[in-house]
Structure formats: structure tokens, C-alpha cells
Amino acid sequence: MEFDAEKLRRAFGATDQKRDAGLTTPDNIKRYDDIIYGKYGKYNLLDIYHKKDVTSPQKTIIDIHGGGWTYGDKDVYQHYCMDLAQRGFTVVNFSYRLSPENPFPAALEDVNTAFTWVSENAGAYNIDLDKICVTGDSAGAQLASQYLTLLTSSAYRKLFSMQIPFDKITVKAVALNCGCYDMKERMGGEADEPFLAYIDKALSEDKDMTLERINVIKYINADFPPTYVMTSEYDFLKNLAKPMYELLKEKGIICEYKLYGNVGDEYMGHVFHLNQRLEEAKICNDDECRFFDRILG
């Protein structure tokens, strides 16, 4: 059966609209909206948020949104990102090209373009390039782990033709939320239709190279940034978090693992931390920002 991207988008969109209904921009947040960072129109826009009283560069989070590589944009993530900004960060929230209309590696290329833009425009938006952290959830966590491997592994960079600003931007810490990481493993079944749709064109054009490019965990090394790996009791990707944590620990990377929620808390599902009305989301986001602060020193 052919992957129905529009069906997925309708389902995810309805859930997110219900989650965020009635939320508004906090009075103490300054936002810069719809900044053009690349050449792909609505897919290459970003927002930046920080508290109104911020007048100099400060610690910064770059968020990479989820959505199965098929759904989502910066507007879906604005309330979560503004909540992070309330914790004393400048936050960069960007859209990227979606699959299947824009197959692999389009999303990864846009992540690179966004990070390059940040490296070149930090001074105008109270971004401290010496204090960059990253958050990513679901497919965004996959993209985050892949892009940070590009930044930290010269061997992995050789597989791509992109100009990676590894010498201009250093990520000090990352939070990987409810994500998937071993991408070669995700080629196995019906549940992975979004991922297969994302990489199918690349596989048909150059199977060997594509399989090597998605084998990200092979290239993770000790230079990968300190990492907070999070999942929840009813996250459908729960079983993928602990192996990632164990891999990072084996590489000698500073890392923490946290499973949120208890058996019976069925509302503690995939990407629960985006829900501004959940007390557990506040706890999780506090925990991750404390981890960032500890690493930043």
C-alpha cells in the first residue's frame, strides 16, 4: 500500500491543534518571526524567541521538530520553544522540507542550512555561539543525532557534499526526545512507512551510499556532545531510547537517560513534553534545561 502522507498530516495536525488550542505568546517573550534562512520558501523560515529584557548574547537552543519527516513546521512548535525561552535561553525554531515531496537528504540539508545561518547571524539575535544546545524529538531527534554526527565526525562528513560549518558552530549539549536512531534497523516493517517514503528515492538512485549515510550510529564518536536521552512509558519508540543511551555511554560521552511516567499513565505518550498543559512536560523540560546549564557551566 502506498504511503498516504496527507492522511498522516491530517491526523497529526488535529492532535496538535487540540493540544495547543488557546495558547498565546507570553507577555514577556520577544519573537522574531518568519526569518528567511534558505531558498525553499515556506520550508526555510525560522523564528527566534527570547525574553524581552535580554540585550546581549545568551545561551541558545536550536530545536529540530518532529513529524515523521512528513509533517510539522515551526508554527506547531512555537509554544514549546517559547516555553524553553522562559527558562533563560534564546531559542531558534525552524521549518524544513518535508517528505515524500522532498526526499532524503532534503531535511538534513535544511538543518545544515539553518545551523549555517545561525553561525553567520548570531550577533543580531542575542545568540551566544559558545553556548549552543540542541533539542529534537521523534524524527527531529533522528535528524539531530545525524546532524551532530556530521558536525563531530570527519569520516561521516566525507559521505556528503554539503558544506558543514563544523569549524564555526560547536554544539555543547543535546536532548534527544522520544526518538529513533539506528536508521538501518528502521527499514523493517509497515510501521516504518514514513521513513521508507523518506529514503526510497535515495535508495533507488544509490543504494549502497544511502545505506551508509543512514548508518549514523556507526560514525558516532567521543566528540558527540553530552546528551540527555528521554522517553516515556507510553512512547511507541520507548525501546529505542535505552540502546542509544548505552551506545553513547560506551563511547565515553556524558549522557543521562530518563523514562517519564508510570504504568497506567497512558497520557504519557510520544512527545508528551510538547504539551504545555502537562505538569510532567514542565518537569521534563526543566530537567533538560538543567542538564544544559550543568554542561554549559
Image (tube, grey):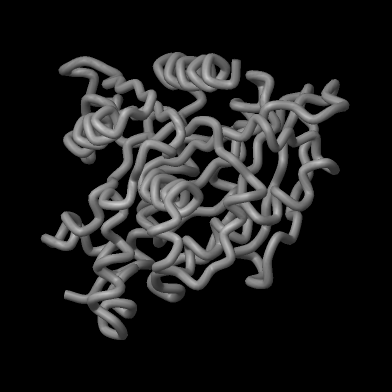
Snapshot quadrant of residue 200: bottom left
Q: Is residue 260 above or below residue 150?
A: above
Residues 249 and 22: in front is: 249
Residues 296 and 91: in front is: 296
Residues 9 and 125: in front is: 125
Snapshot quadrant of residue 193: bottom left
Q: Is residue 66 visible?
A: no
Residues 124 and 261: in front is: 124
Count of numbered badges drawn on the protein: 0
Q: Which residue is farthest left?
A: 189
**Left or right side of 216 for 290:** right
The spot of residue 15 in percent (x, y) is 40, 43
The spot of residue 250 in percent (x, y) is 24, 31
Residue displayed at 29% across by 34% down = 251
The spot of residue 254 in percent (x, y) is 38, 24
Q: Quadrant of the N terminus?
A: bottom left
Q: Quadrant of the C terminus?
A: top right
The spot of residue 282 in percent (x, y) is 48, 17
Q: Is residue 188 visible?
A: yes
Snapshot quadrant of residue 93: top right
Residue displayed at 34% across by 21% down = 256
Residue displayed at 77% across by 38% down = 31
